[in-house]
Image: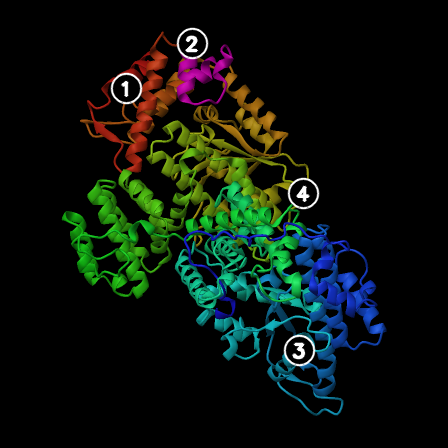
Amino acid sequence: MTRSQSKDDRSDLVSPIVLAPGAPDTLDLPHGLPSYSRFVQRLHRRYADELPLLPPGPPTRDSLNAAYAALQAKELDTSAALRVLRQLTLERLAQLDCSRQADLVVVTHGMTWLAEVTLDIAWQQVVADLDGLHGAPTKASGERAEMWIIGMGKLGARELNVSSDIDLIYVYDEDGQTLGNSEGRNKVSCQEYFTRAVKRMYALIGDTTEHGFVFRVDLALRPNGNSGPSVVSLDALEEYLLVQGREWERFAWMKSRVVAPRSAVVNGSAQALRAVVLPFVFRRYLDYNVFESLRTLHQQIRDHAAKRSAGHPERANDVKLSRGGIREIEFTVQLLQVVRGGQFPELRTRSTLDALQRVAKAGLMPQATADALGAAYVFLRQVEHRIQYLDDQQTHVLPTRDDDLAWMAQTLGHANACAFLSELDAHREVVAQEFDTLLGGDRECKTCNGKNGKTNREHADLDAVLSDFSGSVRERLAQWADNPRVQSLRDDARGRLMRLLQRTAQWLDAGRVSEVAVLRMVDWIEPLLRRESYLALMLERPSVHERLLRLLGAAKWPARYLLQHPGVIDELAGGNLFDSRFDAAEFEGELQARLVALQRTGEDDEESLMNLLRRAHHAEQFRTLARDVEGVLTVEQVADDLSALADAVLRVTARWCWDRLKNRHREEPAIAIVGYGKLGGKELGYGSDLDIVFVYEDEDERAQEIYAAYVRKLINWMTVKTAEGDLYEIDTALRPNGNSGLLVTRFEAYADYQQQRGSNTAWTWEHQAMTRARFVMGWPSLAPRFDAVRHAVICAPRDAASLKAEIVAMRERVRQGHPVKADHFDVKHSPGGMVDAEFAVQYLVLLHTAAHPELADNVGNIALLIRAEVVGLLPMGMGQAAANAYREMRKVQHRARLNEEPTDVPLATLAPERDAVLALWRFVMV
């Protein structure tokens, strides 16, 4: 990408600018600040009669078209009118900008409007001329072939500066042939027609005449650069990007946009480009490979700039390409967008200022940093414009004349040049520091030596790296010598892997990580070696590497989860991972933002949305898992967060499914989801399924059919396995009449069933389940009605003996289904285990809530045990002891599942806890 390489200084700090002794602080400009510009002075002398033809105010598409029409009315041909239009536009922007009547966006958009309008006018002229010579270019279908003029870089992002060249790529939609002239002669291929069109476009836009040029035109970003054809078909572009597209081209194409002809933008044909460009720019996975590519590109720019500025120290003060300049801001934000834009479509935007705010909102950058970089970007761009206003030169280097610097200072609102230069230095230092932070990579391994004497930046071979390890880790890694995955790695990927292992060995020696963690990391990374992005991520982010090792060393289940969903490893890069909890509103807001982003690009098909939901769910569950194994959360907090996550996923999925239901008959569905079991009690664990029941209240005669289709769709969205896995298993067996009943039930029928009205009514075990049921989401008016039904059910009068007999019988059936070794205690199913405590609580709630309303709340078994003691249903100390025992058993169960171990322990291990629950059971149920 040599065309963008230019000046830069190579110092570690931004070099401050010092004024010459005796330099003027301010200028006396009686005719206003813009009049100082030598370029503006020339325009006033040359185009005094034409300047009023541009309507007052900032240039817009309409005002530019009006001015062009007025210039043609003065008998200027197309070429001359376009060039004079540029001069009028620049004079207007200089007047507004230098008198501080226009902000940066007004200037950059004004220049972008100029480019789009002039390109559209020129294209219309070219097409009219060529059609007369060769006839219209047509596709096999007989339709006219379309040409798209693609604006790259600042033109695509609507960020043109006042002396920008324009980076263009010409693409036509399909090969074919022209129809011939009026005599049917001079037929040419579409390729030849459009090649001639590009030459004519350059003459109309880029040639220099007595009125100057409209824009300098650069086609170097086209496929194969200057050695490639000036125009390509859409198929040829797709093949090039797929086969030959380089990493730096992804950054260039990220800002691409069809800017002309206007008709292609209006009729929507330009949308065909998206399907080709988006997969090239934004990969489905988190793509940290681009770090090294961008680092290399930036170093090439710095090296080139150093050669250019050798012997010319004034060239080091380039506000675009020097250290801390505009390019480093653009690189910073574009890098974050390209790395994550595939999975987080809300980051996809062309505007630098907009992108800074989006990456901050996504938590990829502190808000204060985004604001500081945004302020620096605006200031540096305004400085850039003033440099260019002076003489209409395409330069970004600060002037050396003291009076020029003093003028620039005044136009930016500074009292003198010293104050201006001080602010400039401050902004550049902020930018430089942030850029170095982002692209620092694995700096801690650049100078440290491994045991074998090689620096970690070298591509050591596996045999050499093995000497850094010992014992079981060395034996495990030795197996890689014949591993085809390792052998087939590219050289750069193999180098990353070896450096990663060297760093791991250093941490293992220092006691920062455990041998078990390293072995699990090896097992985890081996099947993922062909997905080189994960190697790049850990190498670029040492904190992620270390957190991963700690996580893997803590338990077995995280390793399995990471193998199933490796993309979640990026969540370890979050700076506030351990300082926050799950936020449902933020989670749903982010998903909605991603949906909107996908809708903008036409990618909101059902499979894409299901994958979007899965990635978000997996990432959030992994965050909770990381906090869990680090000891940041208690078992109860883990369950609360996982339950809140399930609620949020249900809400989003339900909303998106309804929006895509073909036969929906109303704006909002009059349906609700009732949660039972662990979801209802907010005690979900990792991998728990969801026990839910669907109820509706809708008088429409089609309601049953529509809601049944809706529920089937929702369950499918939740359970189907896509490329990103699944969300939850759904169990609807607790609906009225179980699996033989209707999938979705009218609320009145549900209430009758639960409240023993009619011949078809709920069993006692279903009322036990109702003690842990809650309204999860849905039609607002159904929430209080469900609460009323639940309250009526648990407060209904019951015969104590009959209730006790039924619950004891149910408990025995459950126990028989889960036999336990004689010398072991299963924390859930053995006598004195968690199920005994849960059944005892359910008995107390169903028998005594009418007399003790405190038991009605669905607050969990621990709280209910304490409440039962407080109201006198349990002897003093018994409820608290049983609650403490239940909490400890949950902890043991939780740790066992994280380590994929059985939940039974030696009989003596939890003896006090077992005795506490047995005492509760005997007192309540015997």
Q: For the residue marked with disc 4, what is the amino acid?
A: Glu
Residue on which disc 1 sits: 913
Q: CA distance from mark 1 to mark 3?
A: 89 Å
Q: Nearer the viewer, residue 279 or 127?
A: 127
Q: CA distance from mark 4 to mark 2?
A: 47 Å
Residue on which disc 2 sits: 870
Q: For the residue marked with disc 2, what is the amino acid?
A: Val
* Looking at the image, residue 829 lies above or below residue 556: above
Residue on which disc 4 sits: 667
Q: Position of residue 162 (x, y in %)?
A: 65, 62
How many C-alpha atoms fall within 10 Å of the one at disc 3: few (<14), some, or many (≥20)?
some
Tell me the SS state at disc 4. Answer: loop
Answer left or right for 245 relative to 895: right
Q: CA distance from mark 3 to mark 4?
A: 57 Å
* Looking at the image, residue 383 lies above or below residue 142: above
Which quadrant: the C terminus?
top left
Answer left or right for 540 relative to 777: left
